[in-house]
Image: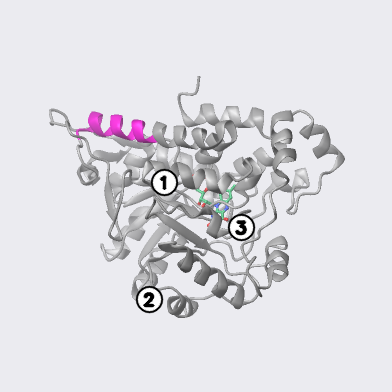
Amino acid sequence: MKLNVEDYRRAARTVLPRFVFDYVDGAAERGDCLQRNRGGLDRLAMRPRVLRDTRGLDTRIEVFGETWQRPFAIAPMGFNGLTRPQGDVLLARAAAAAGVPFVLSTASNARLEAVVQPSSALNWFQLYVMGERAIAEQMVRRARRAGYRALVLTVDVPVSGYRERDVRNGFKMPFRPSPATLANLATRPRWLLRFIAHGMPGFVNLAEEEGSDTLQLQAALLSREMDRSLSWESLDWLRRLWDGPLLLKGVLHPDDARQACARGVDGLIVSNHGGRQLDGAIATIDALEAVLDAVEDRLPVFVDSGFRSGLDVAKALALGARGVFLGRPLLYGLAVDGEAGATAVLELIATELERTMILAGARRITELERGLVRAA
Ligand code: FNR
C-alpha cells in the first residue's frame, strides 16, 4: 500500500536499476543540503485556525494569467526517459490532466515538440545555456513555436554538482553498461524488458532540427559544459528571444532577487536544485523569507527542493510562496507505475494539501497566511 511519497520512493528503489535510482534520489557530496531542506521544513509547525467554514474548498491559483488547479507543478528534470521510456511525455500528460504545469528540461531524452500537451496552457520549458549561444537561441525559438508558455532559466548549474553516488556507479550519459551495472540490471527484468522494447532513450535530441548542430549540443551536454560567461547582462539577450514569462530558477540570495526584479524577470524559483548542486547551500524554506522581502510583491516567488507532502506545500504557501515545484516525488511515481504513478503522486499531494487546509481553517490558497506557521 502506498500512502505517502516515502512509500513511492521505497517502491521505486525496488523497480529501478541501482544506477538509475541513485541518479534520481541522489544529491551533491555529503548530502547536507538535501537534509537541510527537510530539516527546514520539519522545523516549521502550523498554528491552525478553528471554527471556520471550509466548505467549497478551492486550491486554484492564477499565475501569468493562467489557472493552475493546484498550487504546485512538476519541476524540470533531465533524463526522465531513464526512469521510464517516454518519461517526459508521461509526466507532461499527468500534469495536463491534473491542470498543473510541467516543465520540460533542456536535458530531456525527447524532442520538445513531442512532449508539449496541446490540451494544456501550462507547458513550460527549462533552459540551460551550454556550448554555443546559437544552440540556446534555436531551442528557445523552437519552444516558442511549439507552444511553450513560460521559459525557466536555471542559474544554479554553472558547473554540475558532484554527485558521489553517480561517480561510484560509473553513471554517465550516454549510458555504457559496466560489468557491475549489467549484473544489477539482471535483477530489474521489468525495467530491462521495457528498455529493450523501446530502445534506450535517445540521448538528448532536442536540437534535432534541420541544420542545427546536434553534435555540438550533445557534446556540451555530455561534458555538462555550461556557459559560465552567462551573467545578468545575458538576460537582455534572452529577452530579445523570448517575449513570454521568463523565470529564474536557483535564486537563494535576496540581492539576486532584487537584481532579477530590476532586470524585468517575471518570476523566481527559490531552489537549491534539490540539494544536487552546492552542498553547502541554505535550505530553500529558510531562504524564502528574505527573497520575498526583497521582491516586495513585484513578481511571483515559487520554491522547490525537499517538498514531499501537501503539508510541506501548505507551509511554503503560508510563508508567501506563490507555488511549489516538485521533483523526485514525480519520478518515484513514474518509476512505479508510469503515467498512472505520476498522477497518483499528484493526487496524493493534492489530497494532503486539501486536508491540511481544512484542518488549518483555510478555504482558499490566499487564506494560507503567515500567522499559520511558526518555528517549532
Ligand atoms: C533535477 N533538477 C533539474 N533542474 C533543472 O533546472 N534542469 C534539469 O535538467 C534538472 N535535472 C534534474 C534531474 C533530477 C533527477 C532531479 C531529481 C532534479 C532539479 C529540479 O528541477 C528541482 O529543483 C529539484 O528536483 C527539486 O527538489 P526535489 O523536489 O527533487 O526534492
Disc 3: CA contacts within 10 A as few (<14), some (14-19) or many (>=20): many
Q: Which residues are magenta?
A: 349-361
Vertical placement of 146 versus 93: above or below? below
For the residues labelled 2 and 1, the Cα–Cα distance comes to: 31 Å
User: Residue 19 lies in what quarter of the image?
Assistant: top right
Q: Nearer the viewer, mark 3 or mark 1?
A: 1
Q: Is ligand 1 closer than 8 angstroms to the Cβ of mark 3? A: yes
Vertical placement of 87 versus 278: above or below? above
User: Is disc 3 placed on a helix, strand or loop?
Assistant: loop
Is residue 157 rendered to the left or right of residue 256?
A: right
Q: Are marks 3 and 1 in contact (CB under 8 Å)?
A: no
Residue 162, numbered circle: none
User: Is disc 2 placed on a helix, strand or loop?
Assistant: loop
For the residues labelled 2 and 3, the Cα–Cα distance comes to: 26 Å
In this view, the residue farthest toward the top is 1
User: Residue 313 lies in what quarter of the image?
Assistant: top left
Residue at the image position 38 percent from the left and 38 percent from the top: 312
Quadrant containing the C terminus is top left
Percent across and percent down for residue 119 are 39, 50
Percent across and percent down for residue 133 are 59, 77
Q: Is ligand 1 closer than 8 angstroms to the Cβ of mark 1? A: no
User: Is disc 1 placed on a helix, strand or loop?
Assistant: helix
**Residue under numbered circle 2:** 263
**Residue under numbered circle 3:** 107
Q: Nearer the viewer, mark 2 or mark 1?
A: 1
Choose the circle earlier in sequence order: 3 or 1: 1
Q: Amino acid at mark 1?
A: Ala
Q: Choose between 190 and 15: the one closer to the eye.
A: 190
Vertical placement of 373 versus 188: above or below? below
Q: Nearer the viewer, mark 2 or mark 3?
A: 3
Residue at the image position 37 percent from the left and 66 percent from the top: 245
Q: Amino acid at mark 2?
A: Arg
